Image: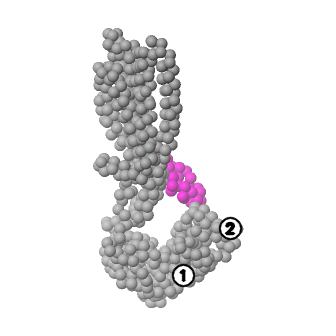
Amino acid sequence: MEKEGLLRRFIAYYKPHLKLFSLDMLASFFVSLIGLLYPIVTRNMLNDYIPNQKLNLIIFFGGGLFVLYFIRMLLKYFVQYYGHMVGVYMQSDMRKDMFKKLQQLPFSFFDDHETGKIMSRMTNDLAEISELAHHGPENLFMSGMMIIGSFLYLSTIDLALTLIIFICVPFLLMAALFLRKKMRIAFLESRKSIAKINAALESSVSGIRVTKAFNNSLKEEEKFEVGDKEFVKARSKAYKAMGQFYASTGFITDVFNVIVLISGGIFLYRGDITFGDYSAFIVSVNIFVNPLTTLIQFTEQYQNGVTGFIRFLEVIDEKSEEEKAGAIDIKKVEGEIEFRHVSFGYDQKRMILNDISFKVEKGKTLALVGSSGGGKTTICHLLPNFYHVSKGEILIDGVNINDLTYASLRENIGIVQQDVFLFGGTIYENILYGRLDATYDEVIEAAKSANIYDYVMSLPDGFDTEIGERGVKLSGGQKQRLSIARVFLKNPPILILDEATSALDNTTEILIQKALDRLCHGRTTIVVAHRLTTIKNADNILVIQNGEIAEEGNHDALMAKNGVYSHLYNLQFSSKEERLNFDLTELT
């Protein structure tokens, strides 16, 4: 990314807070200005007021400096507090932009990016940007003012001596520029390693119950150790580059004092300057060197901030889930679904579905069965347009789904999956997620329809019960019924049930199956099921094998064929020995 474009986009985040930022810069200006007064007063004291015993002027200017330093204290408080708040406000704006962008990204982005790494960009990287947003302009402005001001003042003391001092500046800048590139690369690698650690940590914490269940804590520690070693290696490289940077630039700034001492001593020996001017020059040189050192030290923060901003923009610049130009809202959905010669692959090298065609009439139920990895869930993901088909088209009520807005399409499709995701919060809030404008009575009715109402009312806090992260305080069946209640509330004309009961015990499955039967009534439904007894009454059944339709028909017709479906169905009621000897590949 070009530096000009990067800077322009960074500056754009200052605009909403320009007033506060301007006041911060104004306060910084006066802080720098007051800082320049001390050497001026020192010079006058040594050359005039003290030798000539002007006690009144000594007290007056000394008291004046005290008042100005008190004002400077207040200005520094303003710069520290409100200046940092400018950075915080900008960080908040970026975080909102990033979160909004994440909502707009396609499923494929989240397939390729781990949650922990995304979190790292939203927390660690944005925190570094916030610091740069505050300290960057402030350090550049204040240090620049001090360097220019001290140079002008030093020139009034002795121009030749001043020019000798400034000969060192180009060497300092060359060293900084040479070493900065190396440091930038090292810190970028370090940032990536932090993101990797966060991803591993997020995965381990989320799966802590599985880890404990299998007694695999040592394995998780080993996996974390790999990322941690990469982090240590990357940070070592970054700090090595930083050490070289500070050691080299620090040496050059130390040379300033040596040159002042030697050159100033020679000038004083020759009588070119007075002792008072020599003393003031030494004091003033520190006022010049300090902001120069600040700028050098600022390089690390600059590198962290720029690296974080680049990683932030990588997300912002990701291609959003784009609707077709002129996409329309589908108003009243009848529910007819048709796949016409659909082929699809998550990458173009390997197709998951090959030339799939079928039709589901309004209010009918289609069941998808077959071995794992055959493409059943992929079909369910394609219908709401989570992924775009590689070839062919999908139609709802005769309209290509690519011609519909995502919002109107997905508003008319309800999904119940085996892996239920619930948000942290209350039972009521999770059901309400199905339709945010629903009334309290409608939420209650949805809970009753999903056979979860009686259980909720048995809890001390009822619908206000907190369910924990991802519903950890609920059983699998309870979570499943909550997700069903959510879809009842949404009340869509099209329903997708993706193995909604496969992980449940028989008693819970019966309870949930009754809720699902009510949910499916009058809706066009696509059901993915491993337990074939649950789809015996489906209007049509597709046997999906290796991304193709191996068989099609209702239960009786498929059983009469004595093919793949028949063998799968009989297998579920066969003996253990028969199941072990069964080789599905022989049936395809």
Q: Dot 2: what SS? A: loop
Q: Nearer the viewer, residue 464 or 498?
A: 464
Residue 426's quadrant in the figure?
bottom right
Which three-letter amino acid code belongs to the residue tagged 2?
Asp
CA gap, disc 1 to disc 2? 27 Å
Quadrant housing residue 378: bottom left
Q: Residue at x 43, y 83 (%)?
A: 332
Q: Amino acid at mark 1?
A: Leu
Q: Is residue 393 left or right of residue 199?
A: left
For the point 29% across and 23% down, the residue is 163
Residue 10, compared with residue 408, is above or below; it is above
Taking the image as shown, residue 460 lies to the left or right of residue 185, namely right
Q: What secondary structure is the magenta-colored segment mainly?
A: helix
Disc 1 is placed on an element classified as helix
In this view, the residue in front, 274 or 202, is 274
Q: Residues within 10 Å of mark 2 (few under 14, many from 20)?
A: few
- Please state the total of marks drawn on the protein image: 2
Q: Which residue is mark 2?
A: 461
Q: Decide whether residue 204 is among the magenta residues.
A: yes
Q: Are marks 1 and 2 in contact (CB under 8 Å)?
A: no
Residue 432, quarter of picture: bottom right
User: Magenta residues?
Assistant: 201-228
**For the point 42% across and 23% down, which residue is it?**
39
Q: Which residue is mark 1?
A: 519
Q: Give the residue drawn at x 45%, y 12%.
A: 52
Up the image or down, 137 lies above or below 266; here it is below
Q: State the residue in front, 261 or 429.
A: 261
- Of tags 1 and 2, which is closer to the observer? 2
